[in-house]
């Protein structure tokens, strides 16, 4: 455990010293992965399905705010859809605007969720996001999770029905019918509805439990979040007749819980054995405070001193002082 705490302190120190560069690299990697996935799954416009363009845009996004990165990725999606079907691009564009307004209104600080959620879906680990946001976000984070979920299911529907969608046209006599079929297809998925509801309940449940003034509340919240996630999906699959791999749900949830547990170790690690309850008062109130110290350990400061050296290919000796 002490070694893990040392690693944690070293990572925290490294991040504090090089925060600007670390965040830029993370933005670059996140944008690059998102663009590559967009091009590989859509790729209808060959002009932007280009490695050089993707690399340049990812480098540019490394120095841009996350909200602007979300807009740029949305534009890439719309350009691909424009090459496939103008009607589809118009409808998805309107849905993107609605989701962006909702996200800005309720959870503007969760912009990365809109990008990470579809990526996690493609990795078959979407449960990581709601479990994590239950700890580091707020109940309103369920809005950004829902927007990311809807985006994934829309793009998945378009990919699986691209030939039929390509036949829709805004100029055809059945334009209204085309709009109806597209909207029903994009938003009519029972599985999408089930996932949106499940993740919203998981985010709220984890947030409420981890906020309780009880020992090990974060671990209890994670365990209950996992149970709630599995139960709601099982009940929903039966009620809505959704064809979903139950084994995949169990395995994905367990793997996600392990990842979230590791994340939890780095952001919340306390020593409940040294809990103190303090009571004091002022002229107007009595205060009852429960103080739980964080577990921390200083990284060893290693000084390397050379006390003997030889030239002409001979060896060097060192003394290590910690």
Image (cartoon, rainbow, N blue to C red):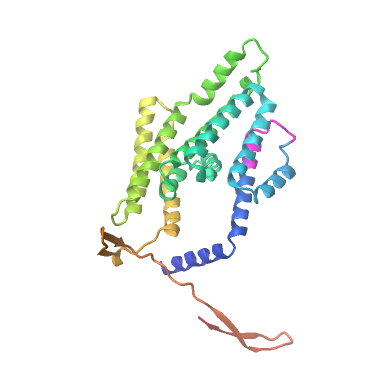
- Pinpoint residue 65: horizontal percent, then vertical percent: 61, 47
* Residue 22 occupies quadrant: bottom right
The answer to which of 270 and 287 lies nearer the viewer is: 287
- Pinpoint residue 313: horizontal percent, then vertical percent: 72, 84
Q: How many marks?
A: 0
Image vertical order of residue 206 relative to residue 6, above or below: above
**Residue 156 in sight here:** no
Side of 291 where 301 appears, left or right? right
Side of 96 where 221 appears, left or right? left
In percent of the image, x 72 and y 46: which residue is there?
Answer: 56
- Pinpoint residue 49: horizontal percent, then vertical percent: 71, 37
Verify whether residue 38 appears in magenta. Answer: yes
Residue range corresponding to the magenta coloring? 35-47
Find the residue positioned furthest to the front.
283
Image vertical order of residue 304 relative to residue 37, above or below: below
**Residue 312 in sight here:** yes
């Amino acid at each position: 455990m002490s070694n893990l705490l040392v690693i944690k302190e070293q990572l925290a120190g490294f991040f504090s010293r090089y925060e600007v560069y670390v965040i830029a690299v993370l933005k670059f990697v996140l944008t690059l992965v998102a663009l590559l996935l967009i091009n590989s799954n859509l790729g209808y416009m060959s002009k932007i399905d280009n490695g050089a363009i993707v690399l340049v845009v990812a480098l540019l996004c490394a120095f841009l705010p996350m909200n602007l990165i979300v807009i740029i990725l949305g534009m890439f999606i719309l350009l691909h859809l424009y090459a496939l079907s103008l009607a589809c691009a118009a409808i998805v564009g309107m849905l993107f605007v609605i989701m962006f307004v909702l996200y800005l209104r309720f959870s503007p600080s969760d912009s990365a969720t809109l990008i990470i959620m579809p990526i996690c879906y493609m990795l078959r680990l979407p449960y990581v996001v709601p479990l994590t946001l239950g700890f580091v976000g707020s109940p309103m984070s369920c809005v950004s999770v829902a927007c990311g979920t809807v985006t994934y299911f829309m793009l998945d529907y378009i990919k699986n029905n691209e030939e039929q969608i390509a036949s829709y046209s805004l100029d055809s006599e059945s334009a209204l019918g085309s709009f109806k079929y597209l909207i029903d297809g994009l938003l009519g998925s029972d599985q999408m509805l089930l996932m949106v509801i499940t993740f919203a309940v998981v985010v709220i449940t984890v947030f409420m439990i981890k906020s309780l003034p009880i020992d090990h509340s974060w671990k209890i919240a994670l365990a209950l979040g996992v149970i709630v996630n599995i139960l709601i999906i099982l009940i929903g699959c039966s009620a809505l007749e959704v064809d979903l791999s139950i084994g995949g749900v169990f395995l994905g949830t367990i793997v996600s819980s392990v990842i979230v547990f590791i994340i939890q170790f780095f952001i919340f690690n306390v020593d409940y054995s040294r809990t103190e309850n303090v009571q004091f008062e002022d002229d107007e109130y009595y205060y009852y405070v429960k103080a739980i110290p964080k577990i921390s350990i200083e990284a060893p400061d290693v000084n390397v001193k050379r006390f003997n050296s030889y030239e002409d290919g001979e060896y060097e000796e060192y003394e290590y002082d910690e």
